[in-house]
Image: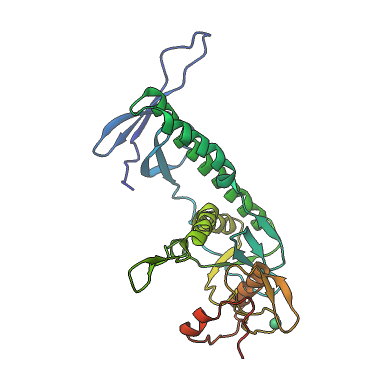
Amino acid sequence: MPQLKADCLTVSPNPHKRKNGKARRDIAQINLPKIGQVKVIYHRPIPEGFTIKTGLVSHKADGWYVTLLLEDKTIPSLTPPEIQANEENSLGLDVGLEKFWTASDGTVETIQQHYRKSEDKLAKLQNRKDKKPHKSASRRQLAKKISKHHQKLQRKRKQFHYESANQLVSRDEQVFFVEDIKSANLSRKNKPKQDANGKYLPNGQSAKSGLNKSINDASWGQFLSIFIYKAAKAGKLVVKVKPHNTSQVCSCCDLLVQKDLSIRVHECLCGLILDRDWNAAINIKRVGLGIFPTIKRPKRSLLTTTKEAHTIPF
Ligand SMILES: [Zn+2]
């Protein structure tokens, strides 16, 4: 983000009046490096005592935006509070594919399927657009409509992330353990498979594509940064933990119960039958509390051959 001068924004009252005699919106101009003076629509006044630090210029479906980062030197920056996590004051959260998150106490946040719900609408618009002749005005109009639709979805999703973060922060727990996942890793494409003659074989990508969509839909990265910020403001703590084996190990007896993603229920020899994500959330909490066992997994080659539902190693 480019550094902006503190006085880059100038606001002056509009000398022209509306037809009804009321004052028009103030005229605001921003001085951007390398670009110069640009007229902007000024949504909110800069609060007293703040200085402009940096600015981000972005192009969205309905125009250009400048986002300003403000600084108030009198306010100390947020430092994460020091809280000792224990069984009672902490909560584990599992990232969902079916659900947005599942907590270690069994609470669930259902996934907002904004994308999927609007997909039909989007597909219809896309269809209509495709039927229009190239370079026609109607085609251009529809393209604009489509990108606005996307923008609206993004905003809705962000709002949902804020609501979900607020809901969690308002709970009694002080420490939240979340999975440290890189969604980019999860949505990586499967390697193409070929047989001896070079013919392409099914590689499970089609099944994974639906999954990828859910992961992107859930957009964890955005949610986590909002959640971390909201928690810090409330004097609470969000701790990222490594989720290795948390979906496979029994949260009751520590047995490794291997299951691929299609198996949605954790069923263990000890008698525990629990929703897969709930079991994982309990384990994530245990990782955070340092009471999760170290698991030695069988070699990779063994793993790939055992595809059945509940493979329990000896
Ligand atoms: Zn068990």
In the image, residue 279 above or below residue 271: above
Q: Position of residue 219 (x, y in %)?
A: 51, 54
Q: Can the viewer see residue 45?
A: no
Q: Position of residue 203 (x, y in %)?
A: 45, 66
Residue sitting farthest toward the right = 271
Q: Nearer the viewer, residue 212 or 18?
A: 212
Residue sitting farthest toward the bottom = 314
- Looking at the image, residue 161 sits to the left or right of residue 251; the answer is left
Report which quarter residue 285 is drawn in.
bottom right
Report which quarter residue 267 is drawn in.
bottom right
Q: Position of residue 79 (x, y in %)?
A: 51, 62
Q: Can the viewer see residue 10?
A: yes
- Looking at the image, residue 192 sits to the left or right of residue 262; the answer is left
Q: Position of residue 71 (x, y in %)?
A: 43, 47
- Counting the numbered discs, the total is 0
In the image, residue 188 above or below residue 40: below
Q: Nearer the viewer, residue 93 or 301?
A: 301
In the image, residue 314 above or below residue 115: below
Q: Nearer the viewer, residue 155 or 302?
A: 302
Image quadrant in which the C terminus is located: bottom right
Report which quarter residue 289 is drawn in.
bottom right
For ligand 1, give the image quadrant. Answer: bottom right
Residue sitting farthest toward the left = 34
Please give the name of the residue rendered at 60% of the width and 60% of the height, measured from the top-left corner: 235
Please give the name of the residue rendered at 52% of the width and 57% of the height, measured from the top-left corner: 215
